[in-house]
Amino acid sequence: MSSTVRNNDELYNRHYNILHTRMKQFSKSIGATSGEVLFLGSFVLNFMLGKLIHVFSSQEAVYNYYNDKRNILNQFFVKKGWAWTTVVIVVFYILILRSKHPKVQSQQEKIRLLRNGLIKYSIMTFWWVLFTQWCFGLPIMDKVFVWTGGKCQKVAEKELLRHFPGALKDKFFSPSSDGESFEASSITSYTCRKLKGAWTGGHDPSGHVFLLVHSSLYLFLETSQFWGSWPSFFGSARNLCGKLRRVPADQSAEPKSKLAQVVDFFHGTPHFIVFLLLSLWWFMLLMTNIYFHSLAEKLVGLLFAYAGALLVYYLPRYLGSSRIST
């Protein structure tokens, strides 16, 4: 028995060492830390988990509250995803600049942090705009849909005249083959939904997947340099929970308010607010992977999200290391 256990341990250690070595090699090749590689890979794991849940769960478990696009998390958070991302990164920078973190001690370091942060935020915002809002006409995700044969169909004339009066109707729309509705291939998916039309016929890259992964990558890669170890992170959270539950021994003493304790915690652990939004985004990505879009459409959204992070965070590292090596 002992020899079997020893052999299993040796096999486990050998496989672990191989995996660890391969991960280090891959991390080095793209200029990423092991933690970043794990985070990048977590979205692939999310895809696989969502697919497994969809395939093997009962219909009652698969189709529920989260399958309704009107659920509060989707309407209040995901639909305003980049706005929430902006709020969180602004709060994070305020907390970091007010903290005594060793990387932002001098005025020069603070100015450099803000300058680099503003540049990266601007580029990532521009990439979000290009993919989801506008790219010299239709956004990229809608261009892909139209280029693959998609269009907005089944638009009622009443809705059309309400939003496209006069000559605009004839400029963008043509009668459908059924003779009772209109269709167009040069309007955005947002406009099509506004007209209560059907966005059908093409490959529809998932804007939800793009937004959630794009926002998550930006938040993590922008703030990870300030994250401490996971044990200290969760230890701080446990200490806060303990303080909030604890009843002071001296009831006559003026206890520190719970709000003040929470504020102190965020000042000491500014990345906790990032962690909260990342957790919500990962959960909502899982809901998207379970309920919406085909695998190919979600994969395209994922690849475009990866592209933004590679451009802003990894390409400069690669170019920098290339200069050093030459």
Image (cartoon, rainbow, N blue to C red):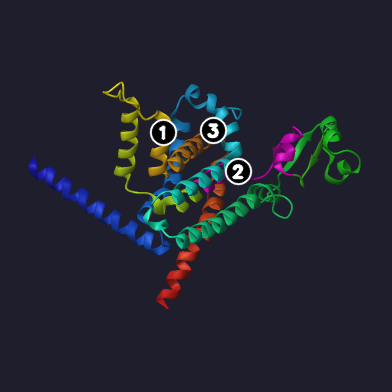
CA gap between label 2 and label 3 equals: 14 Å
Image position of 41 (left or right of 250): right
> Which of the 4 quarters of the picture holds residue 82?
top right
Q: Position of residue 167 (x, y in %)?
A: 91, 43
Disc 2 crowd, CA 10 A, few/some/many (<14, 14-19, 20+): many
**Disc nearer the start of the sequence (1/2):** 2
Q: Helix, strand or loop at disc 3?
A: helix
Image position of 235 (left or right of 37): left
Instruction: Tell me whether the residue at label 3 lies in contact with that at label 1, contact meaning CB atoms closer than 8 angstroms.
Output: no
Pair 2/3: label in front: 2
Q: Helix, strand or loop at disc 1?
A: helix
Does the magenta run of residues contain 190? yes
Q: Which residue is mark 2?
A: 207
Q: Position of residue 218 (x, y in %)?
A: 50, 50
> Which of the 4 quarters of the picture holds residue 162?
top right
**Disc nearer the start of the sequence (3/1):** 1
Q: Quadrant of the N terminus?
A: top left
Amino acid at circle 3: Tyr
Q: Which residue is mark 1?
A: 260
**Res 291 seen here:** yes
**Res 269 seen here:** no
CA gap between label 3 and label 1 equals: 41 Å
Residue drawn at x 56%, y 35% as measured from the top left? 77
Image position of 62 (left or right of 134): left
> Which of the 4 quarters of the picture holds residue 236?
top left
Does the magenta run of residues contain 2? no
